[in-house]
Structure formats: C-alpha cells, structure tokens
Image: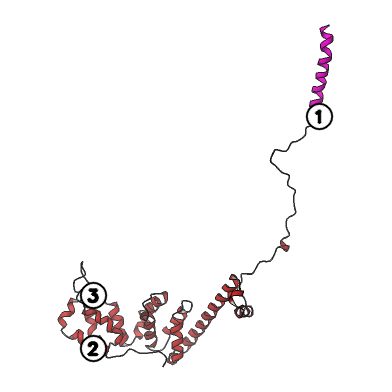
Amino acid sequence: MLWMILAPLLISGSAAAVLHFAAPSRAVAPRGTFAVSAAPLADPGTARPTESSEPAGPAALATLEARPAESLSAAELLRVAEGASEKKRTAARGLRARVEANPTLGKDPALRSELLQLATDERTAPEALAALAALEGPMGSDLLYEVWTGTLVRTDATELARALLYSKDLRAKASPALSVALDLRRAEDCEQTKAILPEALKEGDRRSLHLLGKLTSKHGCGPKKNQDCYACLRSLGDELSATISAVKSRRAPSYSLP
C-alpha cells in the first residue's frame, strides 16, 4: 500500500528535475552594465579645421595690422607682434651689413643715432652693437662706451657692449682719453690706480671725472669700512687734484644729433 502511494510522487519529481536541466540557459547581464553599440570612427578628412599657428605672410600680416587691435584674436595679436619684431630685426641686420661693408658710414649723425636707439632694444641690440664695433677709428669704441655707461640699468646689451670694449681688437682702437677711463675701471688696487694718473693728467676727459673723484674718499675699506682704500695716493700731494681739474676741462666726444 505504501509503494502505491509514494510511486506517483517519485515519478513526478524525477520528471521535473529532467525538464529543469534540459531547458536552455539564459544569460543574465550583470547589474549596472549597459549594451554599447559600435559606431564607425569619424573620417579624418572631415575633421573641423583649426586656426593655423603659422606666421602670417606679408599681405596677411598687413591686413591684420590695419585692423583695430580689439577686433583681433589673441593669436592674431601675437602674429602682429612677431611680425613687428621681425621687421625690426631685419632692418637692424641690413644696417649692420651696410656698416660692415663701409665703416665710414659712422660719420652720418642720423645713422649713429639710429644705431644707439637700436642698441636699447633687446630684439635689435646684438646687430646694433656689431655695427658699432665695425665703425671706423675710435668712434665705435666711444659709442659702445656710451651704451655701456649711459644707463644705470644693466642688461644683456650693456654687458655685451662692455665685453666688446675690452676685446683685444677694439681695445686697441680706443682713443687715449677713453683708454684712461677703461683702465681706471679695470684697476684692482691703489698701486694700479696710481700708475694710471700720469696718463689721466695728460689725456683724460670728463668720462674719467667721477672715477677720479672716488679716489678722494679716505674710507670704504677694512672690516668696518673706515680705512682709506687709496692711501698710496696721499703722498702725491696735489697731483690727484691737478688730474681731476685737467680731465674736468676736457669734454668727452658727443655723437648726438645737432
């Protein structure tokens, strides 16, 4: 009797198990993931053109220069600035070539003035200083000295002017008066300075005046800066005063426009 009751239950359970394992499995996507459809890559040939960063040609640059600054983009303003700088450099290179081909051009006051002006602009200073160095006679050295000492501000241009003045070829071209000033600036101690005074008395001009004036001070050296830096000059009597008076009476060359 018990088998007659349990047999139908066992048969139905076995059939359900067979059906469960025989059914095809269905893949379930992990929670939080999305299906992504593949899209064709954009054709490189259809990419949107960008504004060129290449410098504008002469015609395009002239067009930009004619427009109001507020109507230009940042890139266009930079092109205009770069174009202006290149024009200045080109003009300076041309002027240098002219002077190197004909060093006597320094006799022209307008040209000298232009070179001095170009020497104050960092974009054109190297070319201008090279042109000054190429001028005939002591004039180039005189003008380089003016570039070097004419301002209290020290720049690459003033340092290059100083180096050129002390180069062996230009140092030899310096006038006797300028040589006194250059030697005084190079003197490292009292004895070297003392050896220059006879030449300063004979040839020096106003470019040496303030350099000699410093020698009258009797302090500035020693641990407390209260010792005489030029004690060796005190035995000369009035020679220093006479030298100062002599250079004060001689004007330095002037190359400015009349």
Left or right of 25 in this view: 91: left
Q: Are marks 1 and 3 in contact (CB under 8 Å)?
A: no
Label whose residue precedes the other's in the sequence (1 or 2): 1
Query: For this rendering, which residue is in front, 108 or 78?
Result: 78
Left or right of 176 in this view: 129: right
Q: Is 30 within the magenta?
A: no
- Magenta residues (range): 1-22
1 vs 3, front mark: 1
Q: Position of residue 149 (x, y in %)?
A: 35, 80
Disc marking residue 23 = 1
Q: Position of residue 73 (x, y in %)?
A: 61, 71
Q: Tell me if residue 26 comes above or below residue 246 in the rendering.
A: above
Tell me the distance, in whole angstroms, between the alpha carbons under discs 1 and 2: 122 Å
Amino acid type, callout 1: Ala
- Local SS, label 2: helix
Residue drawn at x 53%, y 77% is: 85
Tell me the distance, in whole angstroms, between the alpha carbons under discs 1 and 3: 109 Å
Residue 209 visible (yes or no):
yes
Query: For this rendering, which residue is in front, 180 or 10?
Result: 10
On-image quarter of the C terminus? bottom left
Disc marking residue 189 = 3
Mark 3 crowdedness (10 Å alpha carbons): few <14, some 14-19, many ≥20 = few
Label whose residue precedes the other's in the sequence (1 or 3): 1
